[in-house]
Image (spheres, rainbow, N blue to C red):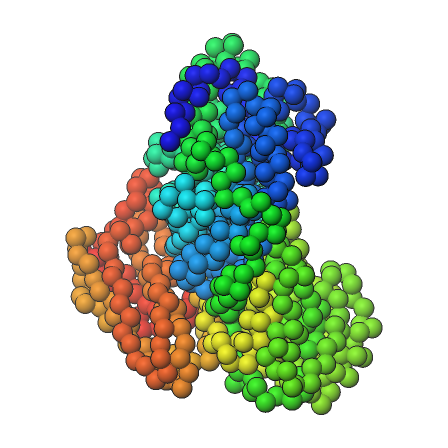
Amino acid sequence: MADIKEILSDMTLDEKIGQLCQYNTQEVVESTAGITGIDENLGLTKAQVDSIGSVLNFANAVEMREAQKKHLENDRNKIPMLFMMDVIHGYRTIYPVPLGLGASFDPELAYDCSRVAAKEASAGGVHVTFTPMVDYVRDARWGRVMETCGEDVLLNSRMGAAQVKAFQGDDLKNPENIATCVKHFAAYGGAEAGRDYSRVDISEQALREFYLPAYKACIDAGTTMVMPSFNTINGVPALANKFLMKKILKEEWGFSGVVISDYHAVDDFETHGYTDNRKENAKIVFENGCDIEMCSTVFFNNLKSLVLDGTFTEEDIDKAVLRVLDLKDKLGLFEDPYRGASDKIDADEFLTEENRAVVRRAAEECAVLLKNDGILPLSKDTKKIALIGPLADNKEIIGFWACMGKPEESVTVKEGIKKLLPNAEIEVAKGASYIWGENSTDGFEDAIKAATNADVVIMCVGEPQDYSGEGKSRAHLEMPGAQEKLIKKIREVNKNIVLLTFAGRPIVLSDVADDARAILHMWYPGTEGGTAAANLLFGDANPSGKVSMSFPKSTGQCPVYYNRTNTSHPKSIEDEDTYLPFHSNYIDCGNLALFPFGYGLSYSNFVYESLELSRNEMTKDDEVTVKITIHNDSDRAGKETVLLFMRDMFASCVRPIQQLIDFKKVYFEAGERKAVEFTIKEEMLRFWNNESQFVSEPGEFRISTGCADNLILTKSLVLK
Ligand code: GLC
């Protein structure tokens, strides 16, 4: 361990402030590895640049080594820089986008994938990843739903915690582990109208119950950093929000790690209309506990004067600097500033067969079988396959923000099927564009010719991978271009259509769902997407994914989510297709999702036979065992995610009609019958009441399984 206090004691105030600043690597470090050098736009002095504590975004380990070496030559204190990057769903071997990972309902899978990413990223010179993103989401119009694990707080919490533990391992000194940064604190996913960066108006109850717990789960799992979000919460930018930054993060949660702003967020107060005084910005943000400013110069240009005018003491600055130096020390950077960085651009750790196997398994386990009339799995004796659509032979299936992943290293659906069925006749036709506004039908003729007389038509359709992610909100969630028309045209000549859908979000499939005999949603599956698709289509893999975020029937329903309350004028599920005057419903659309949270089919046949409670009444000190007996009534082994829901029938704050309180992914042999057990404890029944407390209230709770909007085997449990 380094003596960071000793190091601090030798530093000037200017050098200390440098540790609290982060810029893009290529902006600040001259290097022979193609880094262009100091960016004039930053307006920083050479002394300031030489004191910078961390950088983000760099091409590879060689560039990182060059940058670190240059920095250490120029930094009087020889303090290594931290190198940070967004390793969101893989570094070079890419796994499904996190919303797809959430659909696996398998924290162990998230762990395995994150381990692959950690090792590759560390070899790539990364010390910290800006992951996991656990923003709670309900609106599929928001492009960043792609980066979260879904619309449920428990799912997001468990998947987020698994990623933290996997990336960080047991010891950050181990060069195969890297530090994590949970984001975006907080409630960024509540953006009004699903439009990125827009305002978030939210009650404390919603914050406490839905939007905050997953960040806390990641902090409890040991994440070393927290990144506040761009958005305002109830009119105040997150970085300036004392309730969030001080009361919740520091006082209630006791977070003692490093807080880093989002990109340029410290300098966004003026655009928000919050303050137009950068010195005031610096005061507010630093006072609220932000340690590192990312990619703006408010700290560099104002913190010193805030110390000189007595607003802050140098000890205040020291505390923030020590948090940064402590993270560097935990990572072992003082012993080895290059840590796990390879000396090659293409490290040996990248794209190994072992890594590909992990992400292939992930792509298989994340896919959700949304419809199947029995056509799937296809026979491997299938002779003539028509492979149609803009994603049929498309390398762009690794998803947005795929870090150093290269589309050219991915396996397309065509390549995957060709490899699995070398003797099949596969005819490929793009048929239509998937770009919004490109509605040409010129490609239809070739597609129709390919489909005519084919044994099966596999249509690979959806939205482009860069239609989700930051700044990528959509106002229309249908498939772009003429894809829907294409599907209907193809059906005129061949009814054996299997849709393979690709998207970074739930898309609207209402107008084509009836045209297909099966729908397999792949999300954006990553480097091995085509191999996984082939394995799933032809039965070498059995789909086990469940919907992690509700698929709307119409964009107009957004936000549509499962844990809704009943309202004063509810419409029953049975009346879904009927408009009822003076009911909570639409004249022109149903209320329910087309495919609800927790829904997903399998090639197995899981028959839910019973749900038993060990007792029907409980006190706050009791625990209740729930036993759900399931029979895999098929000749095919498979995994089933068993979901446990509850409904608090009456409470001082109205409660959701269905709320996930536990889940387990369980393997069944063919024909196997198994009892899956859960334990209900009183704290699982609590909610945030109007007296600002997490409480449970006596009364009836309904305990169910199944999936949202299709709860089964419901039993009553009374809390005394
Ligand atoms: C971006 C994103 C954030 C990311 C950061 C660094 O603007 O909001 O998620 O980690 O900048 O790339």
298 w.r.t. 522: above or below: above
Q: Residue at x 57, y 23 (%)?
A: 75
Q: What is the x, y in percent for residue 515?
A: 63, 79
Q: Is residue 474 left or right of residue 212?
A: right
Farthest residue toward the front? 343
Q: Is residue 520 left or right of residue 562?
A: right
Residue 124 or 216: which is nearer the viewer? Answer: 124
Residue 597 lies, in percent from the top left, at: 46, 64
Quadrant occupied by the C terminus: bottom left
Tell me where residue 333 appears, x and y as whole percent: 47, 34
> In which quadrant is the N terminus drawn?
top left
Seen at 78% across and 66% down, the residue is: 439
> Quick check: 637 left or right of 418?
left
Residue 325, quarter of picture: top left
Give the quadrant of ligand 1. top right
Which of 444 and 339 lies nearest the eye of the viewer? Answer: 339
